[in-house]
C-alpha cells in the first residue's frame, strides 16, 4: 500500500516530462517594421507593415487565439486576410497582396506580411502554437 502515491505520480511525470512541445516565438518591432521568428524549423526576419498614423497595433505579449486560412474583414470592405493568426480581439498577423508597402506602417492595426511568409508562419503556428510579443514605436 505504501507504493500507491508513486503510482499516482507516475502519469503526471510522464505528461510533464515526455511531451514538451516547441512553441514558435514571434517578435514584432514597430520601430523597425520587422518580425523576428524562431521555431523548430528555423529563424527568420521578415518585413511587416503595422498601424499607420491614427490607428494602433497593440503592444504586449499574446498567444495565438485562432487561425483562419482565409478571413475577409467585415470592418474594412471585405479585404482578404490570408493565413490569419488572431492574437488580440480583431487584431491579426496575416498576409497582404500590398507587398510594396511592407517595411512601412500602413495598416489599420493588423500586422501584415508577404503571402509566402504568412503561409509559412501560419503552418508553423498551426503545428507548434505561438507566443507573440510586440514592442517599439511607430
Image (cartoon, helix red, strand yellow):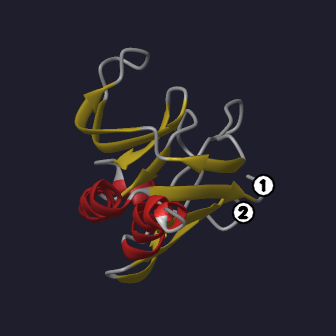
- Tell which residue pokes out farthest to the bottom in this image: 42
Q: Is residue 33 visible?
A: yes
The residue nearer to you, when weighing 41 against 19, is 19
Task: Bin the neighbour count of mark 2 within 10 Å (Cα to Cα): few under 14, some 14-19, many 20 and up.
Answer: some
Task: Bin the neighbour count of mark 1 within 10 Å (Cα to Cα): few under 14, some 14-19, many 20 and up.
Answer: few
Q: Which mark is residue 103?
A: none
The residue nearer to you, when weighing 83 against 76, is 83
Q: Position of residue 12 (x, y in %)?
A: 47, 61
Q: Decide which of tag 2 and tag 1 comes sooner along the chain.
A: 2
Q: Quadrant of residue 51?
A: top right
Q: Quadrant of residue 54?
A: top right
Q: Residue at x 70, y 37 (%)?
A: 53
- Check the image and report above or below for 18 versus 121: below
- Check the image and report above or below for 86 versus 62: above
Label 2 sits on a secondary structure element that is: loop
Q: Given contact means CB atoms under 8 Å apart, are the residues at marks 2 and 1 in contact?
A: yes
User: Which residue bears the numbered disc 1?
Assistant: 137
The residue nearer to you, when weighing 105 against 5, is 5
Q: Residue at x 56, y 68 (%)?
A: 34
Q: Residue at x 37, y 46 (%)?
A: 94
Label 1 sits on a secondary structure element that is: loop
Q: Position of residue 136 (x, y in %)?
A: 76, 59
Q: Position of residue 7 (x, y in %)?
A: 43, 64
Locate residue 133 relative to residue 112 in the image: left or right: right
Q: Is residue 48 visible?
A: no
Q: How many marks?
A: 2
Q: Which mark is residue 31?
A: 2
- Check the image and report above or below for 92 versus 75: below
Q: CA distance from mark 2 to mark 1?
A: 5 Å
- Check the image and report above or below for 89 versus 64: above
Amino acid at each position: 500500500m505504501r507504493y500507491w502515491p508513486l503510482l499516482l505520480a507516475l502519469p503526471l511525470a510522464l505528461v510533464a516530462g515526455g511531451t514538451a512541445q516547441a512553441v514558435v516565438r514571434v517578435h514584432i518591432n514597430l520601430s523597425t517594421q520587422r518580425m523576428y521568428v524562431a521555431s523548430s524549423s528555423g529563424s527568420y526576419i521578415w518585413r511587416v507593415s503595422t498601424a499607420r498614423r491614427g490607428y494602433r497595433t497593440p503592444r504586449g505579449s499574446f498567444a495565438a487565439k485562432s487561425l483562419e486560412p482565409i478571413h475577409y474583414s467585415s470592418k474594412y470592405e471585405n479585404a482578404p486576410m490570408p493565413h490569419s493568426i488572431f492574437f488580440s480581439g480583431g487584431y491579426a498577423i496575416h498576409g497582404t497582396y500590398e507587398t510594396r508597402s511592407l517595411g512601412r506602417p500602413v495598416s489599420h492595426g493588423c500586422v501584415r506580411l508577404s503571402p509566402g511568409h504568412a503561409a509559412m508562419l501560419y503552418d508553423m503556428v498551426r503545428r507548434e502554437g505561438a507566443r507573440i510579443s510586440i514592442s517599439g514605436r511607430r
